[in-house]
Image: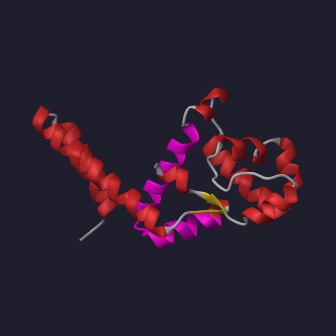
Amino acid sequence: MAITDKIYLKNHRQIVSQLDTNIPKRVFSGATLEILYSGEGLAKVDDATRDRLLDFAQDFLDCENSDDIYTGYPERQFIEYLLELRAQGLGPDAIVDVMSDDYMVYAYPGDVLSFLDDSVRTLESVEALADVEGDREMQDEARRAKQDLVGPR
């Protein structure tokens, strides 16, 4: 299960109450994206919630081709966001706090830790394959990306 399947709306009950309709708790669920980010959905929520939802939409849903929203574009953008937070030196708990403050979404720190660990393992594999193929540029790039995730020891 991808990390984006484990990102949830903070204050879900309150938002559902304001919308007067039921939506999935998962942020990247098609139904959630459809209802929350339609003009009608945004008009029904309070100002503070609307501001955070608009920030989320601007940062993760604003793609050049509107069909890209259904091709994994928002999920890829959010994964980049998580990796950037980790590269800034934040741990799983701090990452959850920042995403909650920024966008009113949350995840469990253990899920974020598993995602980061899986990312390091993937980069180790890329680095090893690049070594076998003799692709020093890719090997160095994977090593640098892995160091960004692992941080100083």
List x then y, in percent, for residue 91. 42, 70
Q: Is residue 24 left or right of residue 122?
A: right
Q: Nearer the viewer, residue 146 or 8?
A: 8
Q: Is residue 65 left or right of residue 152?
A: right
The residue shown at (79%, 53%) is 22
Span highlighted in magenta in the image: 73-101
Q: Is residue 90 left or right of residue 53?
A: left
Residue 104 shows in the view = yes
The residue shown at (56%, 67%) is 98
Quadrant in the picture for residue 37: top right
Q: Quadrant of the C terminus?
A: bottom left
The residue shown at (54%, 37%) is 72
List x then y, in percent, for residue 96. 53, 67
Residue 14 within the segment the image draws in magenta: no
Quadrant in the picture for residue 115: bottom left
Q: Nearer the viewer, residue 24 or 117?
A: 24
User: Is 20 rendered above or below residue 38?
Assistant: below
Residue 91 within the segment the image draws in magenta: yes
Q: Nearer the viewer, residue 67 or 84?
A: 67
The residue shown at (79%, 60%) is 15
